Amino acid sequence: MNDYRLILFLLAALFSVWAVMARRLLTSAIMLALVSVTVSLIFFDYGAPWAGVFELSVCSGLITVLFISAVTLIREADEKNPENRARFHALPLALAAFAIASWFYLPAFFAELAAWARPGNGGGTIGLALWDMRRPDLLGQILMLAAGVFVIKSVFPRRNEK
Amino acid sequence: MDTGLLAYLIIPLFAAVVIPFAARNRPRLADVLANVTLLAGLANLAWLALRPSMIAGGFADIPGDALSLLLVAAIYLVALCVTFFSAWFLEEGLPNRQAYYSLILVSVAAMTGVVTTSDFFTLYVFVEVLAVTSFALITTDDSAGGIEGALKYFFLTFPASAMIIVGLSILMMTLGSLSYENLRIFMASDIPAGPVTFAAALLLLGFVIKSGVVPFHAWTPDAYQGAYAPVSAHLAGIVTKISGVYAIVKLATLLRFFDGRAAALSEMLMFLGLLSIAVGALAALRQTSFKRMLAFSSISQIGYIVLAAGLGTPLAIMGAVFHLFNHATFKTVLFLNSASLEKAAGTTDMDKLGGMEHPMPWTSWTSVIALLSTAGVPPLSGFWSKLLIILALWESGLRTYAVLALLFSVVTLAYFLIMQRKVFFGRKSAAAESASEVSAPLLTPVVLMSAVIVAAGLLFPYFYTYIRVVAERIIL
Amino acid sequence: MNSFAMEWYLIALIMFTGFYCMLVSRSIVRQLVGLEIVSKASMLALISAGALANNLVYAQALLITMIVIEVVVVAAGLALLVKNFRLHGAADIWKLDGLKG
């Protein structure tokens, strides 16, 4: 694959490792946002602009805002109980071990999976794909948004002080 | 998508959205709206399926896939019992009363979506909606146990979803589409099935985690025990089944296990099923909390369904589907009764409860019926579904599996008899002295469900015809 | 080497990182971060598979729905976290061991 995409993938992996190993939760949240930006750039490189746009605006935007607000709310609790950092510092080691061990058989396995791929027709616009082929999913999305609203209403009810 | 049953999805969603506006000043209206919606749906379903002309014709005229109709009926029945019970159980000042009913209605809509879709990705979407509503429902009463159960459920369910997505992407890549029909046609043809089977294995793994099958059952006891009481009945009664076990049964029929096409998957499923039966039955023996014991009993019974699904022969599928329906009825009764016990006697610790039959006869007798049916005592419905499963195992030559399944059923029966004698029919304990029977409206749903259990057992020939139609339609 | 295999290998590494984070963390927010990483990896897998099969439009339609789901799930998780913090003053999952048996 082209070098640009390879670099982006490696950056995504790097940012995710950084997000896991960061001491402060705020750093983790920001690294997660950077992972989202990188993933969105990867989507653009694949030629999937709609995926890239959604990922950029929703994931790196909305979700980061949610995370940062939550992190600021629970900051005191987190600082009172610092975690055991040793297990996190072991991550690069564990990751390297996994990477080396799986280098011997995972890429071959995936290459074989790729050989079975059935080429599709790839045509059509996104609107057509969503409305014609995946209309029940739209109903699912509506249901999901309704569920989200009711979850927030249930978890943070407006208590009437009578 | 089975558009015939689409109304059963849209109407609860509509009611859920209307509730916050309609019930703004009169909280009780939320209860009424929820119950009326579910009752209307159930009445309509009963008319569709139980007309005398339909029964006389051997259920041949049931529209579409008869399995969807049966499961939608189970969904509405359990949800109606839970909402009816909640209407009298919820405390007056509960601030999120409307949100509670809206969430239950949305989860009913999501479950209807799960069982009527014919596409794997749509299945995934509706299962996610179901998971999100479930864990808000678990924490309705702000208890510490509820939050703990909900968090454990959260952090086990969503990684399973990631696995399902990876399976779906491989499926999309190697099969070309994500619909049930294409998978069925593919497996029926002679094309070597390698990667498709791998994708299906990932899907099965994800759904196995979501059903609470051993060894991924860590969240089940905590979620059932810590959840708000009527919500435990909702969860154990129908949600875990629809979000995990239904997909396993569906995949088992699509992958044509009975043809021996995906032998490794089939054997793995059967092994996990047997493991769940064993672990659930044995762990239930050591519990002191009634709810926790019920949770482990659920794990055991779901093991029977997964075992039968793994076998995949028509008789086994019939047993699996019938046991799914039956288990929904048993667990609803038992968890609603445990909520009643908690309300009346103040505890669900089985060491402290004794001789509950004297102050609470209705609760005790309905629990006894449900427990005996779970253990498989004739002529109750549980006996027939277990018999079908064990017969299917025996017929396929898997004598050891059949014998072990029967053995653990006997173990469960022995334990339930001992436990019943102590908790319901023994000497009256201190808790029993101060308890009194709960009010009639709280008893109505459990009496209704117990009647269904007894009727399903006595009218088994009719049920047999129905599930035979189901098996014919979904396997071939 | 086959580019698809390389991409999926790296995706597997990212997923390992996410799962490791979920297993090892005590704080609920960090576990949520791990869950997010796993989720991103699965989305990458979907688009990669779609690109290989020349079915990108279909894959994107699926992805849009997936992103909507993910937003609601993360919002629900964070809402639960904040509620837990308000009620019990802790965001530590190992402190929750009230249910035993």
Image (cartoon, helix red, strand yellow):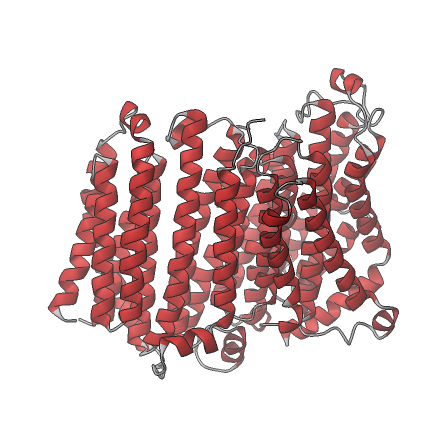
**In this view of the protein, can residue B362 be seen by the observer?**
yes
Give the percent coordinates (x, y) of residue A23.
21, 34
Name the quadrant containing residue A43: bottom left
Give the percent coordinates (x, y) of residue C17.
26, 48
Q: Quadrant of the C terminus of chain B?
A: bottom right
Q: Nearer the viewer, residue B407 or B381?
A: B381
Spot the residue most to the top: B430
Spot the residue most to the left: A3
| Number of dots carrying numbers | 0
Tell me: A102 left or right of B137.
Answer: left
Look at the picture and state if A15 lies above or below A78: below
Q: Residue at x 66, y 72 (%)?
A: B4
Look at the picture and state if B155 lies above or below B110: above
Give the percent coordinates (x, y) of residue B326.
72, 52
Give the percent coordinates (x, y) of residue B28.
69, 40
Tell me: B175 left or right of B86.
Answer: left
Look at the picture and state if B330 lies above or below A137: above
Tell me: A124 left or right of B30.
Answer: left
**In this view of the protein, can residue B380 be seen by the observer?**
no
Q: Residue at x 24, y 38 (%)?
A: A26
Name the quadrant containing residue B384: bottom right
Q: Residue at x 26, y 59 (%)?
A: A56
Q: Quadrant of the N terminus of chain B?
A: bottom right
Tell me: B408 left or right of B383.
Answer: left
Q: Nearer the viewer, residue B37 or B205?
A: B37
Q: Nearer the viewer, residue B84 or B174?
A: B84
Q: Nearer the viewer, residue B202 or C60?
A: C60
Look at the picture and state if B448 lies above or below B59: above
